[in-house]
Amino acid sequence: MNNFWLCFVPLFVAVDALGILPLFMGLTQGLTRSRTRRIIFQSVITAMMVALIFLFIGKGILMLLGITVADFMIAGGTLLFVISLSDLISTEKRRLQMEQEEVGAVPLGVPLIVGPGVLTTTILLINQYGLIPTVSATIVNIIIAGIVFWMAGSINRVLGTSGTKTISKLASLILAAIGVMMVRKGIMLLISDGASVP
């Protein structure tokens, strides 16, 4: 159970459902309640399918390419840091212009709920804590994102625009720290692997 929470927290931060919320509300503005619910369902299903497929074949692809855990930790940690830094210094998340019927799969499902940061985090967590805790935490976090979208109106009324943005920035700061931690662990692993080679 402890491993589940160790997986849950980084993924919760990486998904950043509250940070996506303003974009979701903008993309679904003017839609009927039934159509909005259909888009929420579509985004959750798309995100879950992409995440689970990557969880099961991602590690195999890395092995095929000869990429070690340490290599991926350093590259993945750097990517997480860059993504979070971009979110921290930007004034607002870029609004994507596309047909409203398509927004459930792209961009809400991928890459907003499950993007590079989430995919990178899942691979790193599998190596550290195992498949079952990582899969469980991934599924729960995607469902939470769907619930946040479902309750969009209520959440926005309680937090307001500034509150939502503040939480999003805090989440990005935590994700940046997690990225630095992953790079540090990757470098330490490279050093220990090098020291063990005769």
Image (tube, rainbow, N blue to C red):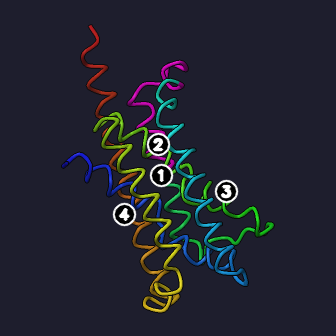
> Looking at the image, is mark 3 or mark 1 earlier in the sequence?
1
46 to the left or right of 71: right
SS category of the residue bearing label 3: helix
Say which residue label 4 marks.
174
Q: Which mark is residue 76?
A: 2
Q: CA separation, marks 3 and 1?
A: 23 Å
Callout 3 environment at 10 Å: few (<14), some (14 to 19), or many (20+)? many
Say whether marks 3 and 4 touch (CB < 8 Å): no
Q: Which mark is residue 80?
A: 1
Q: Which residues are magenta?
A: 61-79
SS category of the residue bearing label 2: helix
Say which residue label 3 marks.
105
SS category of the residue bearing label 4: helix
> Looking at the image, is mark 1 or mark 4 earlier in the sequence?
1
Of tags 3 and 4, the one toward the viewer is: 3
Q: Position of residue 120 (x, y in %)?
A: 48, 43
Give above or below for 85 relative to 25: above
Q: Nearer the viewer, residue 192 or 24?
A: 24
100 to the left or right of 62: right
Say whether marks 2 and 1 touch (CB < 8 Å): yes
Q: CA separation, marks 3 and 4?
A: 27 Å
> Looking at the image, is mark 3 or mark 4 earlier in the sequence?
3
